[in-house]
Image (spheres, rainbow, N blue to C red):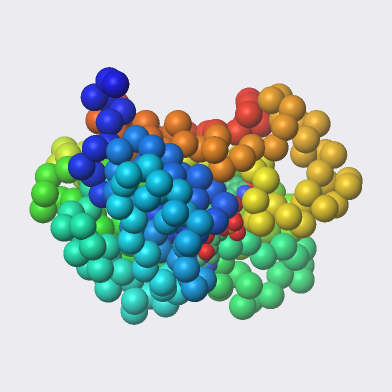
Amino acid sequence: MSKLFDLTGKVAVVTGGGKGLGQGMAIGLAEAGADVVIVTNFSNAKETVEAITKLGRKAHTIVADLSDESKLQDVITEAKNAFGRLDILVNNAGIIRRTPAADHAAQDFHDVIQLNLKSVFFLCQYAGREMLKQGSGKIINIASMLSFQGGINVPGYTASKHGVAGLTKAFANEWASKGVQVNAIAPGYMATDNTHQLREDPVRSKEILSRIPAGRWGTPDDLKGAVVFLASPASDYVTGHVLCVDGGWMVR
Ligand code: NAD
């Protein structure tokens, strides 16, 4: 196998790796050779852990509410101590609240910004400090089509994901010369719990599907290639990039 995409001996942290897109990416990283620390806010990440250990890789689970800013340094410290190093951070955990802008509750706006943006800032900072010390590292933030577009009924989510794209570029500039690359993946419309409401709405789901050139919703497996690329030496001269994995949605 080409060394370019080989993650043997690397340790990855995937937030929200217990289900959905995070689960797909955690397994993809393990398939490429990485050991994986999964951070989850529900009781365990059994399914993901089983899939990773079946591949002969190690998995460690940290149960934490990443909305609680005061816990984030401990999460990174425990993640590093789990296997003795920290090479890759995938900031995937995220929530969405759907209500029209005119009625969007302050609490919803706050909750979404707290987890999707503020926690991402601190996790980049805390993990980044470890990576800067070792002179290498890869951070991959999960952005969205709504890092580029306005969306409908999700103003807090859109603000958070525009912010994620901005943070990615800000950290990338400062750390590019120090061996740490910071990029983002912008998934298109993917079949997970995050889009359950949309897929249940016959009008919206038809509208969305008809705009996707690939002619189907994406799946967690569709992110494996992009995350391995951005976590591996193949992307050592790629930084500050927001990579769309969207079946062509963005260019339509
Ligand atoms: P999902 O709802 O299945 O997964 C969300 C994940 O975040 C879960 O693993 C959950 O455990 C974790 N999480 C939620 N609140 C948390 C908290 N307080 N602390 C720790 N972890 C928490 O949805 P998904 O589609 O897999 O979403 C993953 C990421 O992808 C999110 O950032 C989402 O915004 C982004 N995204 C999804 C789509 C899509 O179409 N599904 C598109 C673009 C971006």
Q: Position of residue 8 (x, y in %)?
A: 24, 37
Quadrant in which the N terminus is drawn:
top left
- Of residue 64 and residue 103, the one placed in the foreground of this image is 64
Residue 12 visible? The answer is no
Q: Residue at x 31, y 28 (%)?
A: 5
- State left or right for residue 60 relative to residue 43: left
Q: Is residue 18 above or below residue 233?
A: below
Q: Position of residue 163 (x, y in %)?
A: 47, 54
- Of residue 192 and residue 149, the one placed in the foreground of this image is 192
Hey, which residue is sitting farthest right in the picture? 203
Q: Residue at x 45, y 49 (%)?
A: 51
Q: Position of residue 133 (x, y in %)?
A: 11, 53
Q: Position of residue 57 (x, y in %)?
A: 31, 47
Q: Residue at x 78, y 49 (%)?
A: 199
Residue 178 visible? The answer is yes
Q: Is residue 2 above or below residue 95?
A: above
- State left or right for residue 127 relative to residue 186: left
